[in-house]
Image: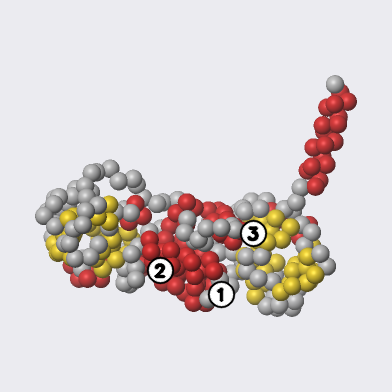
Amino acid sequence: MKKLQFLFFLSFLTLAAGAQSSFLLYSFKGNVAVVENNVEAKAKVGKTMNSNATLKISQGGTATLICNEVAMFTISKPGSYPMSKFGDSCKVSGNSVSANYVKYIWAQMTKSSGSPGSNRKAYMSTVGAVSRSINNIWVDPRLDTVNYSGGEFPLSWKSYTEAKDFDFHLYSADNIVEPFYNTTVSKLKISIPSFTAKMKPGQTYYWISAIKGEDNEERKVLNYVTKETYDAVLASIKKQGAQFEAPAEQAYRIAFMLEDAHYLSEALDYYTKAATLDPNNALYRSTLMSFKKDYEIK
């Protein structure tokens, strides 16, 4: 019995010794190369490596990597770095980058099928509540609460019937029974800037969409955020980045975190910025298209 236990222990040690970490190149600048099987190639965002690879960084170069889906670290000094030496860097530390975002990037850049960026909400902490009322209008749970400080962005909905006109009602937090603004639209959405003149920054409002002439009691929240409040949120998100992020990676991370925080109009700006800064990145392009489709943006 003791012999069997000893053999099992040896097998466990062998497996543990042979276990390898996996790395993903998240962002870099300058002259960075990857050496695998004695073959050197230029670095590329999204490149995956195992512990047998070596990262070469020239003078002035910097690279940020994700290890085993959870840990993110930056190498900023020139030299050749065998990935096998970074086992300690694969431990989760006090890194301020959102753990959900790190897992999301890993999943998106290593997936072999599906549309990149289409399942963002699976990695977000706040995606809205399930609809509880029964009516002919359905609003995406991601629009349950919208924080808005400016920019072109629509509130949208789906209709279970072939209606031609829809009533839009806007309520103040002081009176959620009687709307202070009503209008009728022929599309399944309404542009927020079309009624911002009726609102005051820093106030919370509620909105309802309904087939013309029908009732709908399911109110959604629209926070008209002041510029100062939004600037503070944006500054906080920017600080949560890795030690090094290229402009495109930073813009994409900011967009993801703004969307998670329900700043949808502002998230659109940053998704657009990321796709513009790195037009060859399939994830950034696909996410922008997916975002527009999700929120009925043409």
Residue at left offset 61%, top offset 53% = 70
Read off the residue under disc 3.
Answer: 66
The one of 19 and 125 positioned closer to us in this rendering: 19
> Which is closer to the viewer, label 3 or label 1?
1
Left or right of 224 in this view: 126: right
Under mark 2, the amino acid is Leu
| Quadrant housing the C terminus | bottom left
Between circles 1 and 2, the one closer to the viewer is 1
Q: Earlier in the sequence, mark 3 or mark 1?
A: 3
Residue 268's disc number: 2
The residue carrying mark 1 is 280
Which kind of residue does numbered mark 1 sit on?
A: Asn
Looking at marks 2 and 3 on the same chain, the residue that comes earlier in the sequence is marked by 3
Left or right of 89 on screen, residue 125: left
Q: Is residue 282 left or right of residue 135?
A: right
Does the rendering let one see residue 52?
Answer: yes
Q: Quadrant of the N terminus?
A: top right
Residue 235's disc number: none
Direction from residue 37 to residue 239 in the image, left or right: left
Q: Residue 288's x, y, as percent?
A: 45, 68
Q: CA distance from mark 2 to mark 3?
A: 25 Å
Q: CA distance from mark 1 to mark 2?
A: 19 Å
**Mark 2 near mark 3, Cβ–Cβ under 8 Å?**
no
Please state the horizontal and vertical placement of residue 132, each as a whole percent of the image.
28, 43
Mark 3: amino acid: Ile
